[in-house]
Image (cartoon, helix red, strand yellow):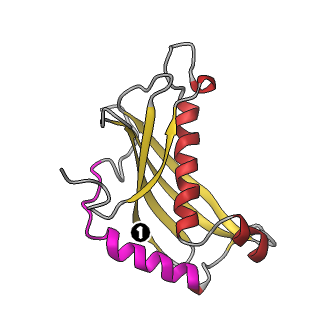
Amino acid sequence: MVTSSDLNFLDLPALTVLPEWIDYNGHMNVAYYVLAFDRGVDTFMSSIGINPNYVKERRASTFTLEIHVNYFQELRLGDPLRLNCQLLDFDKKRVHCFLSMYHGTEGYVAAVSEQVMTHVSLETRRSSEFPDDIHLALKKLMVKHQRLPRPQESGRLISIR
């Protein structure tokens, strides 16, 4: 069996569907999928060097510009979650990534999230270029991830067919 690690995805920490994440339909509310994906993005950012110390010391961070979430199968109370992240692209200021959320034991894809973020100076509150060390970390990750197949859900438009 091929695992995401074998394919060089960035595996993210496991989560569990908590009671406060359950809505009146008896499943995980859409807002908490976004929360779980956001925790994954925090881990992704930390892996390239953007963490709380970076924010404090360099007075810079990343802000989300756009996010698309596709929901495929519901998750319920206590379900374990597994996430991974694929870097799709980056430039001097922006990162484009794709996250997948799996049921931790049954293995099905519950949801995916495609996101674009920009690097921001917290002094000016404007976009700014990544410093050289972060740009290098992105470049190294891109080398690994450019070999991965592009997710079929990436780049989708929202519409009614």
Q: In the displayed structure, would residue 22 be above or below residue 136?
A: above
Residue placed furthest toward the left: 1
Q: In the displayed structure, would residue 121 be above or below residue 136?
A: above
Relative side of 145 to 51, left or right: left
Q: Where is residue 110 in the image (x, y as percent from the top left)?
A: 37, 34
Residue denoted by label 1: 89
Q: In the displayed structure, would residue 1 be above or below residue 81?
A: below
- The part of the image, by quadrant, that contains residue 141 is bottom left
Q: Residues within 10 Å of mark 1 (few under 14, many from 20)?
A: some
- The part of the image, by quadrant, that contains residue 63 is bottom right
Q: Can residue 126 be seen in this view?
A: no
Q: Residue at x 62, y 79 (%)?
A: 129
Three-letter amino acid code at disc 1?
Answer: Asp
Front residue of 143/19: it is 19
Q: Can residue 84 be seen in this view?
A: yes
Residue placed furthest toward the bottom: 132
Q: Residue at x 51, y 13 (%)?
A: 25
Relative side of 33 to 62, left or right: left
Q: Residue at x 34, y 34 (%)?
A: 105
Q: Helix, strand or loop at disc 1?
A: strand
Magenta segment:
133-152
Front residue of 64/16: it is 16
Which quadrant would the C terminus be assigned to in this image? top left
Q: Where is residue 94 in the image (x, y as percent from the top left)?
A: 54, 69
Q: Where is residue 39 in the image (x, y as percent from the top left)?
A: 57, 49
Q: Where is residue 107 in the image (x, y as percent from the top left)?
A: 30, 37
